[in-house]
Amino acid sequence: MLPLRRAATPHELLAVGIALQDGGLDAIEISRAHYESWPAQVLGEYRGFWRAQIREGTGRKARPVEKAISLAAAPLVERLAARLAPGSEGFNLPYSQRFTRVLDISVICVGGFHSRIAMEEAIRAGGCEAVSAARAFIADAYLFRTVTGSPTPGGPVCGYGNGCIARFGGQPVDCYSPKIRARKDAMLRRAAYEEPEAARA
């Protein structure tokens, strides 16, 4: 949430979850992606985030003076965000556990998941009944295969760079980390070659 703005508390949100369950909801996903929860909505790396948002994302539509002020403040804002909201797998689990303990419906947790180990542990430990992923799929279009099969050595893994989110509203949804993007492109080239070969075999 923004400074000095009151947000819904976990207790209030749990009451909403109970009401939705009583109304017939089958499952609920625990996230934190509300625009007023920045930087906590997108935990991870923030170097270049604010500048990319101003130059390439939704900030492009800001007035020139607003852009100038935002760009001048960017280094400080990015350092502060990096300290307040570092990324890790399953960063919403503390919240989803509260809902899992109270609700009878399925609780789904999103938040930095990209490995089978972390996904299985989240479910095994009772933090949720299922996990979902977003940025991990942007980095690895074959994430399902990566998680359920044998990971490709050197394959793309989301580094929580947040470049995809910074450019939202201005650029295509994609991974903007040069190293991860290079691995993604190499994986897609291999897949484009291997799939026709497998079909002919």
Image: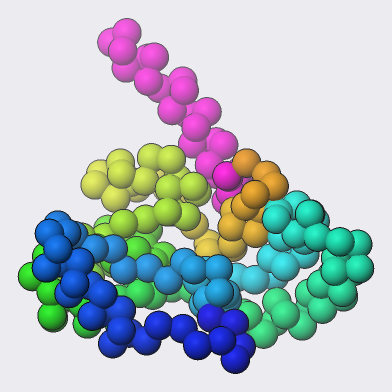
Q: Residue 98's image quarter?
A: bottom left
The residue at the point 35 percent across, 74 percent down is 92
Main SS of the magenta part reads: helix
Q: Is residue 79 left or right of residue 118?
A: right
Q: Which residues are magenta?
A: 173-201
Of 43 and 36, the residue lying toward us: 36
Of 127 and 158, the residue lying toward us: 127
Q: In the rendered image of this protein, does residue 53 appear above or below residue 77?
A: above
The residue at the point 52 percent across, 76 percent down is 37
Q: In the rendered image of this protein, does residue 182 appear above or below residue 162?
A: above
146 is within the stretch colored magenta: no
- Can you say which quadrant of the picture contains the C terminus? top left
Q: Is residue 76 left or right of residue 7?
A: right
The residue at the point 72 percent across, 80 percent down is 77
Please provide percent x and percent y for residue 197. Answer: 37, 14
Please provide percent x and percent y for residue 188. Answer: 50, 32
Of 57 and 79, the residue lying toward us: 57
Residue 120 visible in the displayed image: no
